[in-house]
Amino acid sequence: MIRPLLALLSFAAFGAAARAAESPVSAVEAHPTALVLKGTDDAPQLVITGTRADGRTIDLTGVATYGVTDSKVARVEPTGRVVPVANGTAEIIVSVEGKTVKVPLRAEKMEAPLPLNFANQVNPIFTKLSCSSGGCHGKIAGQNGFRLSLLGFDPPFDYDNLLKETRGRRVFPAAPERSLLLTKATGAVPHGGGKKMDPAGEEFKIVRRWIASGAPYGTQYDPTVAKISVFPEHRVVGRQGRQQLAVYAHYSDGSVEDITRRAQYESNETDIATVTEAGVVNTLGITGQAAVMARFNGHVTVFRATVPRAGAAAAFDFKEQTAVDTFTARKWRELGIAPSGLCSDEVFVRRVYLDVTGTIPDANTVTAFVAETDPAKRDKLVDALLDSPEYAYYFANKWADVLRVKRRQQPNRAFGTFAFHTWIREAVGSDKPYDEFVREILVAVGDESKAPPTVWYKEVKTPENFVDDVSQVFLGQRLACAQCHHHPYEKWSQDDYWGIAAFFGRVGFKAVPTPGVSNQNQQNQKQLLFVRNTGAVQNKRTGQPAPMKALDTDPMTAGTDEDPRAKFADWMTSPRNPFFARAVANRYWAHFFGRGIVDPIDDMRVTNPPSNPELLDALARTLVENKYSLKALVSTICKSRTYQLAAEPNEFNTGDKQSFARYYPKRLQAEVLFDAVAKLTDSPTAFPGLPGDKFAPNRAIMLPDESFASYFLDVTGRPQRISACECERVNEASLAMTLHLLNSQEVQDKIARPGGRADRLAKDPRPDAEKVTELFLLATGTRPSKEKLNLALEHVTKHEKNKRLAYENIIWALLNTKGFLFNQ
């Protein structure tokens, strides 16, 4: 116990020293500014905020001194929680650092406990105590014969289980303390979940009173929770700091209730900030941002904590080049960090070639770009690459992943996957507006010979598939869990899920017979997609036909001569849609920076907020203002100074993982790495069944579907396109990948190919120093250091009689370096 105690003492000493070094508090304010307490259970939380002389705010709730002018009316706990005692009026006097603030108080309706509503006051307790979590009674099969709805999203279900199962012995109104519900929760009798309640605690008292009053559910006239909110919504909190939260339930009758002690909390970045059951956020020693979720009665809200670097904010001079830079620079100043310097021309040309075209540049391309003196050369290079066929192929591959262009090893499906991939590639190359691109997929009818986007529906064949893929790919929302229960981290319910599914209700399919093919194989033939005059989707929660309803909209209707999907497409592609443009902007940002502004990129929920909301909004706005041009979006990103920062950290941004104050190196994805090895070794690969192309025959980035066999691609993370999630692609290094590059016969054969690069360099009469430099430029985009050049030349000299072997060894060494394997 000595070491933890010493650590605690040293932490306290550090905190005291840090506070002593802070500028003095110049003003103090309380939230709320006045209180009206109704009933004995109404015990709201005060939040005391101080403003320092330098303008910064600090939470003083935990260090303030509280007094009440009439202690018979109320008392205030040291944590700032106000507890009512009797009817009357008084003032709370808050004192801290020589400053005081007064909070008027009125307590009423204290003479008798107010009626309890099961959904509003009782059921949230089981969520707070994790009884209804997925690991306990909230899982589908329940636990030890007792089941609750997941996270309390279905109060009527929970009420019935508590009162009617096992002959009603879980509650005993005649002797509430003897109710099995309480004896197990307090540990008085064996309980697999351990002790959950203290007999002297608030949760116990509420549940006991509910049982003693006959375990009522409530009346139809009782208000319901419409939303919850948190105060404050966002704060800059120093390292090793704290922030008290206050959470409120807003009811359908307009009333507001403090639920700070009844809400459930969770931090999404526990290495940056943690949160207690009482809603106290504690920041740790890492600079960054954390979101703290508060959940109550099926509703969620979020507090965002920004933790700046300790000490004075770093000063930096940053030339803003696109809209991106305005908002990244603003975030760095908020965090007190400085960005890395500009990357070199050598680094930039390789970086942008790989990110835009999936191709490593030739040595001559790098040399010529570095020698170019035009100050606009970087912008011009971006424009040129966006007009290249490689850009179309590379981004077609990206979209083919999430649109699941998948043959399933069925030869008869090849026509469709090739047609759909070609359609995607031509749309990308011609810069088809993104809203049109998506609309043509959603409302596709016919067969793949005339309407290639119908191939998407070979994988999206059910209403559930439609909701899951549409929401994840085009809206950045993971709604799959809402099929069976309320989303645990969002406001979306089963009704929201089946409301989207209903737009799919009239979609029909039939096979197009192919001459010479037996009936049993017709399922793999061309598929005709059509729209029926009628059709519906059943809401599995209600058992009734689900009304067509997009997210956060009123129900819609469609005539018998209309395609319901068209109405959904109208809503989705509208510039007013809060999800559509932001989702693709975030997806593209993640492609270039290695992580999204919202990360994971397709989990854009309120409890996983953007690390830079203003930046994401600016990118979405850029997309809409440019009529949904994805090339304009790429241009805005790549021409920004933020994208052109060096990957090397400085003393201020070493720990940065969220604010993009430097370029985050990325491992080359499977197809890009495969093509880079082929180009470095000058050993192209022939993929059977893939037609050649005039610019790059048989390159991996050209593959239209997943059915081309390649152990190299599989071991380096190529997805099988089983789902619509980009997470299926693995871009992290692995032992199997490393061993394949080091020792595999496939790679060795490429290096040693007769007529390959090593063979030609051995016969090339140019000086070895020139040839080695060319190899480094091709492999890594940079010239070798003097030390590395001399080492390579010594190796060539050592193998003077077999220069081919020497160059094979140098190529082998280069393709196993981080400089080759990573885009930096």
Image (cartoon, rainbow, N blue to C red):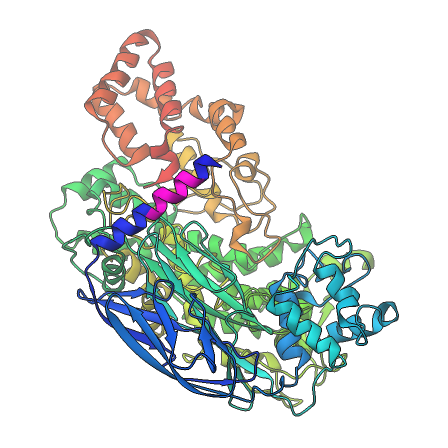
Quick one: 649 or 389, which is closer to the camera? 649
Magenta stretch encompasses residue 6: yes
Q: Residue at x 36, y 22 (%)?
A: 758
How would you classify the magenta stretch by its main secondary structure? helix
Figure quadrant of residue 672? top left
Q: Residue at x 36, y 45 (%)?
A: 11
**Magenta span covers which residues?**
5-12
Q: Residue at x 69, y 90 (%)?
A: 220
Nearer-the-camera pick, 197 or 580: 197
In the picture shown, does residue 330 fall above or below 538?
Answer: above
Is 631 above or below relative to 824? below
Residue found at the very far right of the displayed protein: 167
Q: Is residue 444 above or below residue 322?
A: below
Residue under the image location 46 percent in, 52 percent down: 270
> Dividing the image into 4 quarters, which one contains the C terminus?
top left
x%, y% of residue 127? 63, 66
Please indicate, yes or no, whether residue 465 appears anywhere in the rendered image. Answer: no
Left or right of 571 in this view: 57: left
